[in-house]
Every structure is written in C-alpha cells, then in structure tokens.
Image: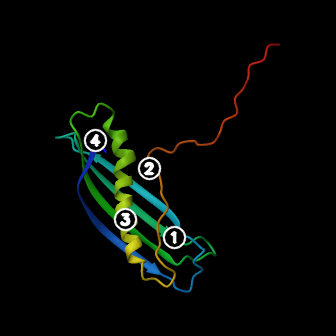
C-alpha cells in the first residue's frame, strides 16, 4: 500500500440538511446532484481547497424516503515530488475523498430510519467522459 500524492489535511462539514419521509416508497431513490469548486493557493501551489455540495431530491411523482443537501470543504496538499498535473489529481480525487466522508455521515444519519440505512452509490468525479462505444469506420477502396 502506498500513500496517495494527494493528502487530506483537514475538512469541515459546513452544511447538513436532510428530511426523512417515512411514508415514501423505499424503492424510489433520490436524484443525486453535485456542485464542485476548486481553488489553488497562489502562494503555495501544493495546497488546494475543494468545496463539494451534494443535493438529494425526489424525482417528479416519485417521492423518496430521503432528501436534503450537504456541503463539505477540504484542504489538500499535493506531495512535492508529484510529477504529473496536480490540478487533474485534485479534480478527480479531492471530491471523491470528500464524497466518502459525506456518504458515511448519511449512512449513519439514516441507520435508524424505518426503511433502513441509505448507502449512496459509488461515483466518479472529474471531467465528464463519453463512455459509449464508438463504431469503428473502415476505409474502403473505391
């Protein structure tokens, strides 16, 4: 096991709002939304700040048992000898680390709900990628 080149130094959960609806159908999962902001410390470019906002809303005509929003701020440091683009490292891994913290809090907050513990899905962060298979085009001679 190796240490990551991105180290979480500290974090704060700055906002927690959630509401349980015990009468909702537990099969109706909320829609998950996110907003991410990333800042680099201009005086020391090895330090980065990541703000992750998550929202959980019911889908139209399908009330979910859980809705709310969470906000977390994390301060990260990239190790000195990291030889790749640090912004990419922070964009993909910073929000993922913070998401794991929020995921754990939601699991704990909902552990005594009448519908059981809610475990958020595993997600990926970073620039949106096209994961669809592309058909290869063969060149044909006339």
Q: Which of marks 2 and 1 is nearer the N terminus?
A: 1
Whole-number angstrom distance, CA of label 4 to CA of label 2: 17 Å
List the residue tagged with mark 4: 5
Q: Quadrant of the C terminus?
A: top right
Q: Could you tell me which secondary element the residue under label 2 belongs to?
A: loop
For label 1, count other residues whose C-alpha is less than 10 Å away and answer few (under 14), some (14-19) or many (20+).
some
Q: Which residue is drawn at 48% across and 61% down?
A: 33
Q: In which quarter of the image is the N terminus?
A: top left
- Image quarter for residue 51? bottom left
86 relative position to 114: left or right:
left
List the residue tagged with mark 1: 57
Q: Which residue is drawn at 29% across and 44% down?
A: 4
List the residue tagged with mark 3: 102
- Image quarter for residue 89? top left
Compared with 80, 40 (above or below) is below
Q: Residue at x 45, y 66 (%)?
A: 55
Circles 1 and 4: CB atoms closer than 8 Å = no
Q: Where is residue 44 in the image (x, y as percent from the top left)?
A: 18, 40
In the rendered image, the residue lying farthest to the front is 1
Q: Earlier in the sequence, mark 1 or mark 4?
A: 4
* For discs 4 and 2, the disc positioned in front in the rendered view: 4
- Image quarter for residue 112? bottom left
Q: Position of residue 117 (x, y in %)?
A: 46, 75
List the residue tagged with mark 2: 125
In the rendered image, the residue lying farthest to the top is 142
Whole-number angstrom distance, CA of label 3 to CA of label 4: 22 Å
Q: Which of marks 3 and 1 is nearer the N terminus?
A: 1
Whole-number angstrom distance, CA of label 3 to CA of label 1: 16 Å
Q: Which of 17 and 141 is in front in this view?
A: 141
Q: Could you tell me which secondary element the residue under label 3 belongs to?
A: helix
For label 2, count other residues whose C-alpha is less than 10 Å away and answer few (under 14), some (14-19) or many (20+).
some
Compared with 120, 6 (above or below) is above
């Amino acid at each position: 096991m190796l240490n990551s080149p991105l180290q979480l130094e500290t974090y704060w959960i700055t906002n927690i709002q959630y509401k349980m609806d015990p009468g909702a159908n537990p099969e109706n999962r909320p829609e998950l939304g996110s907003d991410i902001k990333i800042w680099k410390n201009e005086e020391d470019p090895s330090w980065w700040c990541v703000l992750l906002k998550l929202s959980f809303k019911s889908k139209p005509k399908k009330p979910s048992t859980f809705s709310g929003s969470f906000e977390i701020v994390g301060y990260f440091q990239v190790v000195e000898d990291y030889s790749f683009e640090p912004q990419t490292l922070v964009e993909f891994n910073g929000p993922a680390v913070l998401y794991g913290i929020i995921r754990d809090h939601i699991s704990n907050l909902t552990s005594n709900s009448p519908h059981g513990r809610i475990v958020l899905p595993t997600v990926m962060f970073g620039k949106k990628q096209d994961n669809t298979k592309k058909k290869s085009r063969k060149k044909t001679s006339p």
